[in-house]
Amino acid sequence: MMRTARYLAAAAATLATGFAVAQQPAPPAFAASNLSPAGVRALAANCAACHGTHGKPAPGSTLAGLAGKPKDELLTAMTQFKQGKKPATVMHQLAKGYSDEELAALADHFSKQAR
Ligand code: HEC
């Protein structure tokens, strides 16, 4: 009987801790989009590490170039990554970090870069 009571007390304490964790404040919301020309260039710079400066991959890179691809094609791919509808190793996570408006601005930006 005592053992059961101790067990129940421990279980209650664990539950209480769980509730305390669940009640942590929500993470801060995203900053407002900056879709000015400079703001979009700054967003696009986040892609350069993998897709190359201005969306042109380094020679020999196996990653897809983004420069000069049709806007619709780029936006469809990024939207499908974001929605988990297109298999990916990293893009499904990265795409979730951008609002739909930001993805549209990025697609527009890269479609206008020289191949
Ligand atoms: C850490 C490396 C990395 C970064 C940063 C990155 N990508 Fe990607 N991207 C990939 C990889 C790898 C793929 C292939 C799909 C996969 O495995 O995730 C890909 C695929 C894509 C595709 C599909 C291309 C095609 O023709 O199939 C698009 C569009 C794209 N990325 C856009 C972007 C944009 C826009 C950004 C910046 C916001 C970005 N990526 C940042 C690694 C990256």
Image: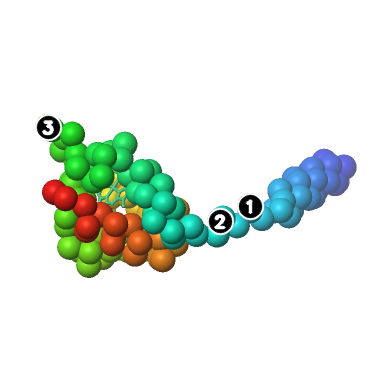
What residue sits 19% from the left and 42% below the top? 56
Q: How many marks?
A: 3
Dot 3 alpha-carbon crowd within 10 angstroms: few under 14, some 14 to 19, many 20 or more: few
Residue 20 in the figure: left or right of residue 50: right
User: For the view shown, which residue lies furthest in the right direction?
Assistant: 2
Q: Disc 3 designates what residue?
A: 60
Q: Amino acid at mark 1?
A: Pro
Q: Is residue 43 visible?
A: no
Q: Residue at x 23, y 46 (%)?
A: 55
Circle 1: element type = loop
Residue 7 horizontal/vertical position (percent):
79, 43
Quick check: 34 above or below 46? below
Element class at badge 3: loop
Residue pictured at 17% horizontal, 63% vertical: 70
Point out the tag, 3 or 1, that comes first from the N-terminus: 1
For the residues labelled 1 and 2, say whether their Cβ atoms are less than 8 Å apart.
Answer: no
| Label 3, label 1: how far apart the Cα atoms are | 40 Å
The residue that mark 2 highlights is: 30
Question: What's the residue type where badge 2 is placed?
Answer: Phe
Q: Is residue 77 left or right of residue 62?
A: right
